[in-house]
Image (tube, rainbow, N blue to C red):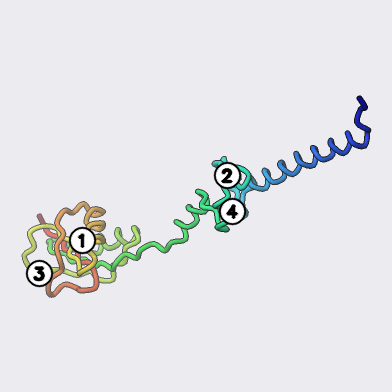
Amino acid sequence: MALPSAVTVGSLVLVAVAGVGLVAVSSSANDAPSDERGDQAKQQPRTPTPSAHTGGGDREKSGRADTPDRQDRTKRERPQPTRPEVEIFNSTGVSGLAADLAAELQTEGWRVPVTDNWYGDIPADTVYFQPGAQRAARDLARELGMTRIRPADTPMSDERLTVILTEV
């Protein structure tokens, strides 16, 4: 039996080395962090995602990868819902209570363009809401530690949440 020539053996070795190099290059290209993620992504280990050579053919056909990184970017890019404005009324004998609460809420991202006194009988601290703003009213009441939430009534604003502070 004849032994393969040196040219044949050399060619086979060259093809094998090229194949290993191609796999190494494509693997490191997939593992390289994107410039969009910055230095933070370089420090975090990546989770494996399907690729064309591991059965992820559908992903390749669609032209996009639903990787955790893409999902995180999508969440960050969504605009945050805007909070409705709040007006705060003081129905207590404590001067400046509405203004103090307004300052606190503004540091939490609420817009409070109106503070004033309230004259009338309100049984407990209450957040009043206009139609469609009940969820925001619940969020605000929870943040303030209030439990009483009611639909707005005349003469309350039909555009803003209304908070009335009482002495109870």
44 to 143, vertically: above or below: above
Q: Amino acid at mark 4?
A: Glu
The spot of residue 66 in percent (x, y) is 51, 52
Q: Amino acid at mark 1?
A: Leu
Residue at image mark 3 = 119
Q: Nearer the viewer, mark 3 or mark 1?
A: 3
Q: Residues within 10 Å of mark 1 (few under 14, many from 20)?
A: some
Answer left or right for 65 relative to 76.
right
Residue at image mark 1 = 97
Q: CA distance from mark 4 to mark 2?
A: 10 Å
Answer left or right for 37 relative to 106.
right
Q: CA distance from mark 2 to mark 1?
A: 64 Å
Label drawn at residue 60? 4
Quarter holding residue 113: bottom left
9 to 22, vertically: above or below: above
Q: CA distance from mark 3 to mark 4?
A: 66 Å
Q: Which callout, 3 or 1, points at the residue further toward the start of the chain?
A: 1
The spot of residue 36 in percent (x, y) is 59, 56
Residue at the location (44% across, 56% down)? Answer: 75
The one of 107 and 67 positioned closer to us in this rendering = 67
Q: Amino acid at mark 2?
A: Gly
Q: CA distance from mark 2 to mark 3?
A: 70 Å
Q: Nearer the viewer, mark 4 or mark 1?
A: 4
| Dot 2: element | loop
Q: Which callout, 4 or 1, points at the residue further toward the start of the chain?
A: 4
Residue at image mark 2 = 55
Residue at the location (27% across, 63% down)? Answer: 102
Q: Which callout, 4 or 2, points at the residue further toward the start of the chain?
A: 2
Label drawn at residue 140? none
The one of 54 and 136 positioned closer to us in this rendering = 54
The spot of residue 100 in percent (x, y) is 26, 60
